[in-house]
Image (cartoon, helix red, strand yellow):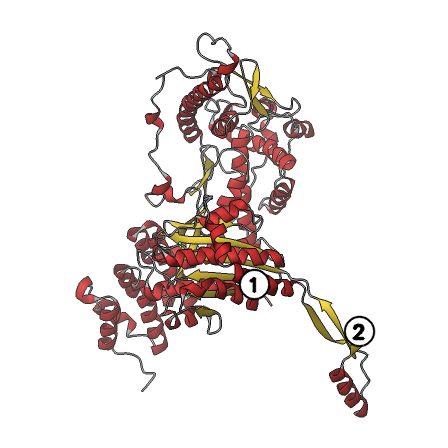
Amino acid sequence: MKHEPLSKEQIIEILDEYLEVEFSFVKNELPAEQIVTLPRHQQKYILNLVKRVADTNIELAYQLACNCVYALEATDTDMVEEWAMTATDIYDRKGLFPAMSVIRDLDHFISTAHERAHGSMFDEEVSVLLPFLHGLSGRKLKLQSAEHTYTDTETIYLPPVMAVFSDEKDNFLLYKATVAHHWAQIHFGTFRTDLSRLDDTDLMKFSSLETIRLDACIKRELPGLHRQMQALRDKQMTAEADTLPTDIIDALSAPGADVNTTLDVLKKVSHKDSPVSRCYQGMINIGAVIETMNRRIEREKVLFRVALSELTRELDRVSEAEDKPEAGGKPEFGLKKKNENEPLSASNSQLEYEGDLIAPPENVRQLMRSIIIDFGEVPPEYLVAAGPGEYDLSVFDSGLKPEDVWQGTYHEEGAQLYNEWNYKRQHYHKNWCVLREIEVQPLYDSFVEDTLNKHSGLLKSLRNTFEYLRGEDKLLKRQPHGDDVDIDAVVEAHADVKSGMEMTNRLFTKMHKEERNVAVIFMVDMSGSTKGWINQAERESLILLSEVIEILGDRYAIYGFSGMTRKRCELFRIKAFDDTYDEEVKARISNIQPYDYTRMGVFIRHVIRHFSEVEASTKLLITLSDGKPDDYDTYRGDYGVEDTRQALFEARRDGIHSFCITIDEEARDYLPHMYGAANYTVIDNVATLPLKVSDIYRRLTT
């Protein structure tokens, strides 16, 4: 019978194929003995799940097969799938042993199901939380998952799952509030005093009192964020309330309050007046703070004094013509506020050298920013320029270079993380691709002028066409008032009257000038295969397009894309939506160069974010490419095509229409599957690319 259960021998045969028994040498008799007891539909479900996991790791899939029957008995199919996919996600991030622990400890997985169902996951939210953190002022910080919540002043450590509230949105906001609170500890000087003298009880009380002060600081600087944090406090799972006297709360909340204010208040607070801990408060890890700060303070003092020494030489060269006498001893600097009514900060300060005020260079300003965060000032000993050979800077050289971004863990610093679709697993790799947005350096040569001269006739024709589009009127029918009679509407109205219906008053036509509301991103292939004539044709197309789109007034952006493996995905900014089409943008187009490979999915997901920042009734993504998605690793063939197709689906879901222009003669084999039958075109002659691109743009936006 068609729906009869598979026999043990049939199951072993299928598992032998899925688990590649000739290479893995696993014994499939054990899982087969369990699976054979199930009805056919459950056998099919388990075998399909084993196949999907086997694409990630054979041993992981084998252990899944051995435990699946027990899993189905203990829970439902949705939970079993989540269990299997969680194991594959952990395998991606941490390796086989932690993933196997998930498979073997099903009971723990089930017991924490509520947390995962309603909680917010660090690995899923870090790509949003990190840009939020970097948008806050001060030192650039990192985020990392850990058992306890705290900061060491350079990294904020957050729990892997935030499940304090019953709603996932609230738990995400709690992540955000926790990030903001620990940023505030660093930014507003919680660690500008020695906290190691406090015992554990006093430290906990200090932390809660300090939270009141920091909340007031956040309220003054970030009132919107403070309102969100206040809402979380109102929902906090406790019936307790602060019993602190009003005068203490007022003292901590005063604009001039600092960490010493909190320490003074700590001495006055009785045991019965203990403040309530906030849900985003975390803990203070004194040991981690001291270790990190000592290391940073030593390094930054050296770097700052050496930077002042270099600045001194530069200033002396500039003033040589003034014939000033040389200062005796080591050059000393001063620091002066720009505005005495504001607290000292890198933006509210100027360096003073030999009586003259100077604007600090960016590298000096960055060091000042970090030093002021630690001390609330720049200590006098920092303001003495280093003497010749006083320090060996190689001690502080990390050895990391921009071209090394794909090595080790450094590749994630300052980058954005994106999921990638694994079609065999039917599941995303979480935070899999590491993308950096890089600005193309302008190249001021004759390319733009040569292109305009070369295509002067075509450009004139395109300008005439696009001028017509800009002034195009649209005939609106069935209007209550208008310039002419709508014959079709009159005929239909007459028929309605004859049949006893009421006659409509919408019997006119009128001309209406349609306002364009278009936003377009051109995504240009900068892979190594575009070298030569293809690269030149792409650049010429972009110059002509930019010239004529300026006539229409459409908002448009241009990005190039290339990279090598999932850890080095580079999107090259040529023109953002807010950039004007000026000489610099033209020079960037001129400097578009071929680089490495074509991992398309991650770039599509990134430009979706750019589209979310603009309001437009028509959002269009046009890709110029010379071949199918491809990369140095597994991103080839069906894998790359399916990930790109999934990314295009995500774009379509967000209201973005995607279109591909390619010169790949084999594109008809894969582009219909990725873009749809009508959303691509194949150009046989590269020389016609500038004309075709402009014509396609006209058709897509009218």
Q: What type is the residue that disc 1 sits on?
A: Leu
Q: Nearer the viewer, mark 1 or mark 2?
A: 1
Residue 332 to residue 89: above or below: above
Residue 397 to residue 579: above or below: above
Q: Position of residue 341 (x, y in %)?
A: 66, 23
Secondary structure at badge 1 equals helix
Q: Position of residue 28 (x, y in %)?
A: 22, 68
Q: Where, quadrant-wise, is the N terminus in this rendering?
A: bottom left
Q: Position of residue 224 (x, y in %)?
A: 64, 43
The one nearer the camera, 321 or 245, is 321
For marks 1 and 2 on the same chain, the one whose residue lies earlier in the sequence: 1
Total numbered circles: 2
Residue assigned mark 1: 462
State left or right for residue 701 relative to residue 630.
right
Secondary structure at badge 2 equals loop
The one nearer the camera, 207 or 565, is 565
Residue at point 63% right, 60% down? 517
Asked whether residue 526 appears in the rendered view, the answer is yes
Whether label 1 touches label 2, CB < 8 Å: no
Q: Position of residue 221 (x, y in %)?
A: 63, 36
The one nearer the camera, 537 or 195, is 537
The residue at the far bottom in this view is 498
Q: Residues within 10 Å of mark 1 (few under 14, many from 20)?
A: many
Asked whether residue 426 appears in the rendered view, the answer is no
Residue 27 to residue 142: above or below: below
Distance, label 1 to label 2, CA atoms, is: 33 Å
State left or right for residue 149 relative to residue 262.
left
Residue 482 got which mark?
Answer: 2
Q: What type is the residue that disc 2 sits on?
A: Gly
State left or right for residue 627 relative to residue 31.
right
Residue at point 58% right, 65% down? 701
Q: Residues within 10 Å of mark 2 (few under 14, many from 20)?
A: some
